[in-house]
Amino acid sequence: MNKPNVKINYLHFHHLLRYKKIGLCALFLLLVGITLFSNYLHQKPLLIGEESYYYLSLSQQDLPYHPLTLLFRFIPDRLAFLFPPLLTIGIILLFYQLMPKIGFSEKKIFFTALFFILTPAFIFTSVTLSSYSLFLLLNLLAVNLLLLETKKKYFSLLPFILASWIDTFSALLLLVSLAVYFFVFKKSKERFPLVLGGSMAAVMMLNALVLKSPFFLGPFTIQHKAADMISDLGSYSGVGVFVMLLAIVGIVTCWQKKNILLMLPALAIFIAAYLFNTYTLFFLSLLIIVLAAAGFVDLVEQNWKLPFLRNAVLLLLLLGISFSSVSYLDRLSEYSPTATDQKTLEWIQRNTPEDAVILSAPENSYYISYFAQRKPVFSLHQHYQQDYQLANDIFTAFYIDELFPLLEQNKVSIIYVSEEMKQALPPGQEFLFLLQNERFKLLYFTEEAEVWSFEEAK
C-alpha cells in the first residue's frame, strides 16, 4: 500500500478527531448517566464503592486528614455522586491541554482518552470517590502549570503538594518522576526543583510518620490477584482483553522506536505494586492504556497489503473494547451498596446500641461505618492479611467451639448477613447453619438480608 492510501485511512476518524473533546465528554457522560440512572431506578445510592463510603464516614470524624475527607466536610453527602464524574471530565480536559506540549500526536491523544473512558477501571473510578483519580487530576494540573516556564510555574507547588498527601507510594512515585525530569532530562540548576522536592518530601514524611497514613492506600475489597486485572473475567474493575492485546502491540512499538527504556521500569514498578496491593491497578491500567493507544495508532499507520483486513482488524478491536465496556456497565449496576444494604444498615443505626460491633463480609465494613454508624469487625485497608484470615476463619467455621471464641474475642454483638453473603456462603452449613444456635437471635429480616444479635454466654 502506498502513502496516499494511509491518508485515506484517517478519513474514518476525521470527524471524531475534529470534535474530539465534545465527543469524548458526551460519550463519558452517557456511560456515567446510564450507571446513575440505573442506580436511581433501583433506588440504590447513586454513589457506589467501598472507598467512597470510607471517605464519607471518615469525613464525619473529628480529625480527617485526607484531601477527600477534608473536602467532604463542606460538600453535602447527597451531592457526593457529582464529584467523581466532574473529576474525570477535568482529567480529560487537562490531559488534552497537556499532551500536545510533550509531543503526543493528535491521534494518540484521542485514542488514549477514548480507551481511558471505555476501560472498566476508570468507569468505576468515575462513579466512586477515588484518591488516585484525584491524584491524577492534581498532577495533570500541576504539570500544565509547571510547563509554563515562567514565574507562574510556582503555582504548581500547591497541586503537587496536595498530590503528595494521598499515600506514601504515590508520593514517592511522583517525587522520583520529578527528580528524573529535572535532574536527568532537563539537567536543571534552578532553585525551584529543590523547593518543590523539599516541600513534597516534608508533606510525605508528615503524612506517613505523624498522620500514620499507609504506604499503599487500600485495598478496600478482598484481593484476587489472578483475576482482578482482567474485567472480562468478572473482576471488580480492571482492563479488557482487547486493550491488553493492544498494549502488547504498544510494547513492541515502543521497542522498535527505542522508547522501551522509559516504559519497562514503569511497567515493572506498577506490576510489582499490583502484586502487593491490587488497589494500585489504577497506575498499571493507565500505563496499559497509553501502550494500547500507541499500539492502535501504529496499526492504523502500518502499510497493510490488504486494506480490507486492516479495516476488519481495527473494527474488531474497537468493537471488542466497546463490548467489554457495555458488559461491565451491566455488572456495575449490581454493585453495592444496594437499596437493601442502605435500608438494613439504617435500621441497625436506629435499633442497636451505639457501641455495637457489627460482623459482616469485609467489603461491607465501609457501608456499616457510614450508614449504620457502627464499628465493623474488619478494616481491610488497615489490617488486610489479619482481617482476611479472620474472615476466612469465621465464615468457614463448622463448629460453634470454633466460631464462638472468634466472635467473643472481637466483641461481636450484631451480625449483618447481606444478600451477597446469602448467595456466596454455603446454605445449610458452616456459618449460616451455625446461626441457628440459641445464642443467636434474629432481629430483622427480609428475603434479601438478615440482622442477628449474638448474646453473651450465660
Image (cartoon, helix red, strand yellow):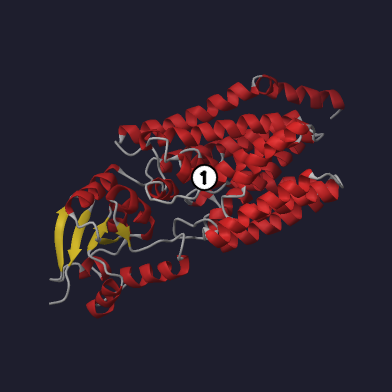
In the image, what residue occupies the spot 68% across and 58% down?
A: 269
Residue 195: x and y in percent read: 74, 47
Left or right: where 416 falls relative to 320: left
Along the line of sight, the residue nearer the viewer: 328 or 362 = 362
Left or right: where 301 falls relative to 340: right
Q: Is 54 above or below relative to 44?
A: below
In this view of the protein, can residue 87 be seen by the observer? yes
Residue 175: x and y in percent read: 70, 52
Q: Residue 74, located in which quarter of the rendered image?
A: top left
Quadrant in the picture for the N terminus = top right
Left or right: where 76 falls relative to 114: left
Q: What residue type is labelled 1?
A: Pro
Which residue is the extreme one toward the bottom? 401
Along the line of sight, the residue nearer the viewer: 311 or 67 = 67
Q: Is mark 1 on a helix, strand or loop?
A: helix
In this view of the protein, can residue 253 be seen by the observer? no
Category of crowding for the residue at label 1, using alpha-carbon neighbours closer than 10 angstroms: few (below 14), some (14–19), many (at least 20): some
How many numbered circles are shown?
1
* Mark 1 lies on residue: 67
Residue 50: x and y in percent read: 41, 50
Quadrant in the picture for the C terminus = bottom left
In the image, what residue occupies the spot 37% across and 63% down?
A: 378
Q: Residue 118, located in which quarter of the rendered image?
A: top right
Residue 206: x and y in percent read: 58, 57
Q: Is 13 above or below relative to 176?
A: above
Along the line of sight, the residue nearer the viewer: 411 or 290 = 411
In the image, what residue occupies the spot 64% across and 20% down?
A: 19
Along the line of sight, the residue nearer the viewer: 162 or 326 = 162
Q: Is 385 above or below relative to 217?
A: below
